[in-house]
Image (spheres, rainbow, N blue to C red):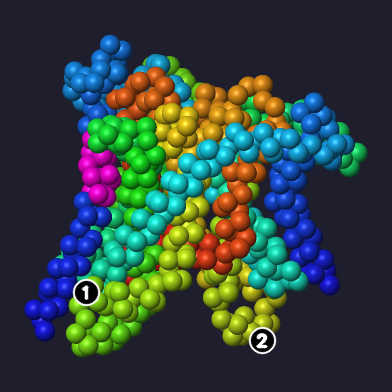
């Protein structure tokens, strides 16, 4: 019997093996190859770039150094800033709209199914379709800008995707310092939460890391000068339209997540809170929202990694060559397949992977760990 | 009472936000090209003009066929493989399965830009460069994590006693799959097939990188090209967008319940 079970386990392994080999190649071998390519000069010599068997030179981290501190790669640095602002506003918008809609639908209004269908249908569309539609919606002289005239108000003036305005500018040289401050603040926040929950080990680790980071920031970080001059980067207003379209497409997803969460809260709990004299507002603030916190975290991570990877939507809305609405995923594509700068493209791809991994790896780890515990 | 009014105000405003773009697409697609001006954007067409749909249909039909071919084959293959993998990971855990599974899952979150260059070379080297079959291979492989995940979670609900009973009846790995597990899988397959169909139909990055010739193009690439020019006639892109959206939209409207299940399964725990 035991032998039989082992033989079947072996069959099982043989059945899954082809998938494992394929994913091993398509994910891990390819990631390694991309990383290796990013350490070469592939593409710097145009004569070699498209050769079938290009002669590559190993140049270490030079491509990365160029991207972060090179004079010509200012565009890449702006894409990082763009990705940052896009991610923040996209997540915030999708969470708020999704939560709002879920809370209203949770009270079972008439026609609930109909409304749910409408709020979620953009999820079934391609980003290319959404982008095409919203590009037409956001024409500066028409579309959304004409909407106020329908009720007799003056026409909107905002240039949307063609806007060249930039606000909240910061010098690239100050960014290491500012980043360290923000991460330090988050760590302190985590530490305080952990102390309150008397998870002492986590609390001390967070406190220690925060102290080290802030120490670094105020000593070395302060004087770090990646560039010999001030290079200003900020939030490109052209992104507002893209954020709007992305929220239109994705807030149905957060609504579905929140709605599933709200429906999972037992009626007795709400009943008990009401018996204790809680108002609707208190019920949400003290009982329901805290119970939804894990969903918020999951949604933030899923949306965050989508927004870091965003490519098709911007390709369709603003085109691949519109510098103000550029993001790393798009720049990688252009650098690699239009300009044939393969090594530089590989470096951008690797940086993008690292950014996504920072978000996803702890998430996968915690999700699967809690599953084992169950 | 105030609560009620507030509730319906929110619903009404949100409905407007979600449906205005749809209204705009439809009226633009139904206007004569000459009648599409920016200051009459929101007005209904004076003359209902159906020719844009005919034109878009002629231009898009071959691309839609490409998309259907690619999507159906890749969806079915990744669903079948996902079902087998999920069965193994749920019921026949081999040593190390708990390490392999997260490594598989990571594959569905990576930015594909991080594999695009070697992938492009690999597909060309195995002789599938520029063809739909190369694209099918890529979609099957990168679809494996999500299909495996959904089936694994689905099969975890099948009680171990049923597997045990099958074993006592003398069935082995394959017998238990074909006689007990597979017949129970229909809802799982519906969820996975709908999810993969939508994802692959809508995908753009692989399609635009791996397929070069216009007669192999999937519909998303064709639409991006049609709408991407500078001096665009908007009736055609809008009609094209409607056509490109129609298959996934129909699936969503008819089978929305299963679509939502796939959506929620993507956040790992399911």
Q: Residue A139, percent across and down?
A: 71, 30
Q: Can you identify the residue that label 1 sits on?
A: B173
Residue A46, above or below B131: above
Label 1: few (<14), some (14–19) or many (≥20) C-alpha neighbours in 10 Å: many
A81 horizontally vs B59: left or right: left
Q: Residue A138, percent across and down?
A: 69, 34
Name the magenta segment's main secondary structure.
Answer: helix
The answer to whether one can see residue A5 in this image is: yes
> Marks 2 and 1, how far apart in space?
55 Å
Q: Residue furthest right?
A: A152
* Mark seen at residue A115: none
Q: Chain of mark 2?
A: A
Residue A180, above or below A93: above
* Mark seen at residue A275: 2
B57 horizontally vs B71: left or right: right
Label 2: few (<14), some (14–19) or many (≥20) C-alpha neighbours in 10 Å: few
Q: Nearer the viewer, residue A270 or A332?
A: A332
- Dividing the picture into quarters, in which one does residue B51 lie? top right
Q: Residue B11, percent across and down?
A: 74, 60
B140 horizontally vs A257: left or right: left
Quadrant location of the C terminus of chain A in the rendered image: bottom left
Q: Secondary structure at mark 1?
A: helix
Residue placed at 29% from the left, 74% from the top? B177
Q: Are marks 2 and 1 on the same chain?
A: no
Residue placed at 55% from the left, 24% from the top? A322
Q: Residue furthest left?
A: A3
Residue A25 is one of the magenta-drawn residues: yes
Q: Nearer the viewer, residue A146 or A262?
A: A146
The answer to whether one can see residue A226 in this image is: no
> What segment carries the magenta color?
A22-33
Quadrant location of the N terminus of chain A in the rendered image: bottom left
């Amino acid at each position: 019997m035991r032998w039989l079970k082992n033989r079947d386990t072996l069959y099982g392994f043989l059945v899954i093996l082809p998938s494992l080999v394929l994913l091993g190649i398509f994910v891990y071998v390819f990631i390694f190859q991309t990383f290796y390519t990013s350490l070469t000069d592939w593409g710097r010599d145009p004569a070699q770039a498209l050769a079938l068997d290009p002669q590559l030179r190993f140049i270490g981290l030079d491509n990365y150094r160029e991207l972060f501190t090179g004079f010509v790669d200012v565009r890449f640095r702006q894409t990082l800033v763009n990705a940052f602002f896009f991610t923040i506003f996209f997540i915030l918008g999708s969470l708020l709209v999704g939560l709002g809609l879920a809370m209203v639908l949770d009270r079972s209004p008439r026609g609930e199914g109909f409304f749910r269908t409408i709020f979620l249908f953009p999820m079934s569309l391609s980003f290319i379709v959404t982008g095409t539609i919203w590009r037409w919606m956001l024409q500066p002289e028409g579309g959304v800008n004409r909407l106020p005239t329908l009720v007799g108000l003056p026409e909107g003036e905002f240039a949307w995707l063609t806007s060249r305005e930039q606000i909240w500018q910061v010098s690239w040289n100050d960014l290491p310092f500012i980043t360290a401050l923000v991460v330090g603040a988050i760590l302190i926040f985590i530490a305080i939460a952990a102390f309150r929950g008397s998870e002492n080990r986590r609390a001390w680790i967070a406190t220690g890391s925060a102290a080290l980071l802030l120490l670094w920031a105020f000593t070395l970080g302060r004087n770090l000068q990646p560039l010999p001059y001030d290079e200003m980067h900020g939030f490109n207003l052209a992104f507002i339209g893209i954020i709007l379209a992305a929220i239109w497409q994705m807030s149905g997803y957060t609504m579905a997540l929140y709605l599933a969460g709200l429906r999972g809260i037992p009626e007795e709990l709400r009943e008990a809170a009401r018996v204790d004299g809680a108002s609707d507002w208190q019920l949400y603030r003290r009982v329901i929202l805290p119970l939804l916190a894990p969903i918020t975290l999951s949604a933030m991570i899923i949306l965050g990694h989508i927004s870091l990877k965003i490519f098709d939507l911007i390709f369709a809305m603003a085109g691949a060559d519109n510098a103000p609405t550029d993001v790393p995923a798009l720049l990688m594509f252009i650098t690699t397949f239009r300009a044939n700068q393969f090594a530089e493209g590989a470096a951008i791809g690797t940086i993008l992977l690292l950014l996504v991994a920072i978000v996803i790896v702890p998430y996968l780890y915690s999700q699967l760990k809690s599953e084992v515990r169950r | 009472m105030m609560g009620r009014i507030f509730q319906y105000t929110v619903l009404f405003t949100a409905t407007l936000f979600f449906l205005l773009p749809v209204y705009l697409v439809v009226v633009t697609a139904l206007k004569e090209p000459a009648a599409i001006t920016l200051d009459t954007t929101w007005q209904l067409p004076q003359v209902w003009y159906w020719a844009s749909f005919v034109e878009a249909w002629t231009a898009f039909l071959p691309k839609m066929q490409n998309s259907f071919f690619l999507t159906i084959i890749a969806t079915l293959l990744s669903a079948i493989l996902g079902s087998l993998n999920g069965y193994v990971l749920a019921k026949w855990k081999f040593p190390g399965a708990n390490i392999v599974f997260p490594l598989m899952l990571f594959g569905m979150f990576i930015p594909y830009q991080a594999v695009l260059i070697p992938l492009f070379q690999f597909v060309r080297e195995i002789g599938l460069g520029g063809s739909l079959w190369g694209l099918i291979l890529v979609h099957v492989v990168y679809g494996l994590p999500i299909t495996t995940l959904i089936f694994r979670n689905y099969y975890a609900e099948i009680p171990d006693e049923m597997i045990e009973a099958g074993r006592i009846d003398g069935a082995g790995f394959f017998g238990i799959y074909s006689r007990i597990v597979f017949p129970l899988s229909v809802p799982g397959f519906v969820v996975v097939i709908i999810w993969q169909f939508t994802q692959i139909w809508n995908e753009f990055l692989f399609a635009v990188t791996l397929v070069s010739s216009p007669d192999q193009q999937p519909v998303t690439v064709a639409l991006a090209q049609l709408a991407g020019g500078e001096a665009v006639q908007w009736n055609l892109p809008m009609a094209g967008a409607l056509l490109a959206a129609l298959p996934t939209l129909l699936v969503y409207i008819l089978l929305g319940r299963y679509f939502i299940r796939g959506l929620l399964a993507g956040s790992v725990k399911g």
